[in-house]
Amino acid sequence: MSAALRLLAALAAGLVFGLGLSLSGMLDPTRVQGFLDVTGAFDGRQAWDPTLAFVLGGAVSVAGLGYALARRLPRPALAVAFELPTNRRIDRPLIGGAALFGIGWGLSGLCPGPAVAALSTGTLPMLVFVAAMLVGMAAHQWFVARA
């Protein structure tokens, strides 16, 4: 397959992902924090917001169908082979990274996908968050290269 076709497919997938995040309200950090704050103690809200649970349920369902389909197909339409994870080990870097991700997600209400999609709002907090995220990713690569 041509590189241009793969690029167009990736762009289309990213646009659908971003549109889904926008339509579901996941570009609003307070919606995520409203889900994570089940007691309302964080910001005084009394009502728990279950929206994220429905978004997550839909995403897991679609991903599950995608994995089931990938197991039945000989190869993907736009690549030579499927690139599925092979490592099944649960180790300290995985647990530490998951904990750091969860803490950051809970405090900010943003994770990488919605943060990049939220750049479309053009707000300064989104620009600062994505810039800080990119600095953190670069720092991680720098430390891993020296380890």
Image (cartoon, rainbow, N blue to C red):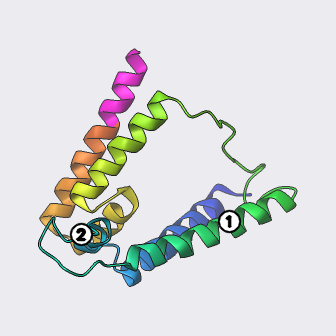
Looking at the image, residue 86 sits to the left or right of residue 10; the answer is right
Toward the front, the furthest residue is 39
- The foreground one among 131 and 48 is 48
The quarter of the image holding the N terminus is bottom right
Q: Secondary structure at mark 1?
A: helix
Give the magenta-colored segment's residue range. Answer: 138-147
Q: Which residue is mark 2?
A: 39
Please name the residue shown 54% across and 73% down the image: 57
Residue 77 visible in the picture: no
Looking at the image, residue 45 sits to the left or right of residue 22; the answer is left
Residue 61 pos. (x, y %): 63, 72
Give, as a three-letter code, the residue at label 1: Gly
Please name the residue shown 63% across and 65% down the image: 63
The quarter of the image holding the C terminus is top left
Is residue 100 magenta-colored?
Answer: no
Toward the top, the furthest residue is 147
Q: Which residue is mark 1?
A: 64
Q: Earlier in the sequence, mark 2 or mark 1?
A: 2
Would you call the spot at circle 1 few (<14 residues within 10 Å), some (14-19), or many (20 or more)?
few
Would you call the spot at circle 2 few (<14 residues within 10 Å), some (14-19), or many (20 or more)?
some
- The foreground one among 40 and 70 is 40
Give, as a three-letter code, the residue at label 2: Thr
Residue 58 visible in the picture: yes
State which quadrant residue 90 falls in: top right
